[in-house]
Image (cartoon, helix red, strand yellow):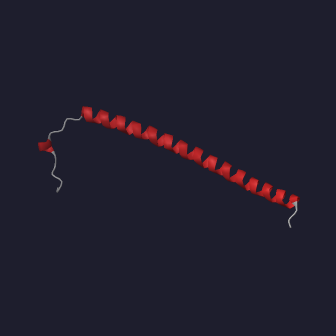
Amino acid sequence: MTSLADRVTELEVKLGFAEDLIDTLNKTMFRQQEQIDLLQRQLSELHRRMLEAEGHESRDPSEEIPPHY
């Protein structure tokens, strides 16, 4: 039968690993959120530019090159 001290030690070791895993996951989630925020800003900027370009662009469909050229 394992002693109480051995069981407590085993629980402490498991807790240490769990805390390390949680810290690693938190850091990963933080970096991912930063990337998501950056991508959202870039997408918004591209959307804004696309809307601006559509407003300044005057196309005449008869002047466009057919797709097989």
Between 14 and 3, which is closer to the camera in this rendering? 3
Q: Residue at x 36, y 38 (%)?
A: 47
Numbered-mark total? 0
- Residue 18 percent coordinates (x, y): 71, 53
Furthest residue toward left = 62
Furthest residue toward bottom = 1
* Quadrant in the rendering for residue 53: top left
Q: Is 9 left, or right, of 30 in this rendering?
A: right
Q: Quadrant of the N terminus?
A: bottom right
- Residue 14 percent coordinates (x, y): 75, 57
Q: Residue at x 86, y 65 (%)?
A: 2
- Residue 56 percent coordinates (x, y): 25, 32
Q: Is 62 left, or right, of 22 in this rendering?
A: left
Q: Is 39 left, or right, of 30 in this rendering?
A: left
Q: Residue at x 60, y 49 (%)?
A: 28
Between 34 and 60, which is closer to the camera in this rendering? 34
Q: Quadrant of the C terminus?
A: bottom left
Q: Is 43 left, or right, of 68 in this rendering?
A: right
Between 66 and 43, which is closer to the camera in this rendering? 43
Furthest residue toward front = 1
- Residue 11 percent coordinates (x, y): 79, 56
34 w.r.t. 11: above or below = above
Between 64 and 32, which is closer to the camera in this rendering? 32
